[in-house]
Amino acid sequence: MQMDKLIADVQQLADIENEHTGLLSRPLLSYIKEWLALESSEMIAAIPTLHKMLVDGQDCDFTGTQWEKEWLANGKVCHCIACVTARKCILDINSI
C-alpha cells in the first residue's frame, strides 16, 4: 500500500515539472522518469537511489535572485510545490 503512495507521489513530481518547467533539477527529473518506467520489483530495488536523488537532486537554486537571501538564510527550506512533494516522497520511502 505504501509503495502505491510512493509511486503516486513520484508521478506527481513528474506532473509538476510538466506544468511548471524548471522546478526539478534535470538529473532528478531524468531519474524519476527512469524509475517510473521500471517493473515493480525493480522499483523496490532502486528505492535507495531514488531516496538519494530526492535528497541530493532537488535543488531550488535561488543564487543571484531576489529570493536568495530569504530562502538560504537561517536554515529556511523551500516550500515550492516541487520541494514539498519531494519531501512527501522521502517520507513515503521512510515508511516502507
Image (tube, grey):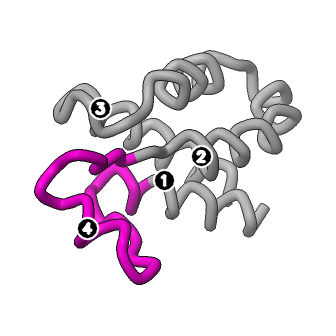
Helix, strand or loop under label 3: helix
Spatial CA distance of label 1 from label 2 is: 6 Å
Q: Name the residue under label 2.
A: 54
- SS state under label 2: helix
Is 9 placed left or right of 49 in the picture?
left
Q: Mark 4 points at which residue?
A: 69
Q: How far apart are marks 3 and 2 (CA)?
A: 14 Å
Q: Are marks 3 and 1 in contact (CB under 8 Å)?
A: no
Number of other residues with Cα within 10 Å of mark 1, as a class: few under 14, some 14 to 19, many 20 or more? many
Mark before the other along the chain sequence, 4 or 2: 2
- Cα–Cα gap, marks 1 and 4: 22 Å
Ranked by sequence position, the earlier of labels 1 and 4 is 4
Left/right placement of residue 45 relative to residue 87 reads: right
The residue that mark 1 highlights is 86
The range drawn in magenta is 60-85
Give the mark nearer the N terminus: 3 vs 1: 3
What is the x, y in percent for residue 10?
51, 41
Select label 4 or label 2 by which is in front. Answer: 4
Residue beneath the point at 81% across and 33% down: 46
Q: In this view, does 55 lie above or below 43?
A: below
Q: Which amino acid does label 4 sit on?
A: Lys
Q: In which quarter of the image is residue 72?
A: bottom left
> Label 1 is placed on what type of residue?
Ala
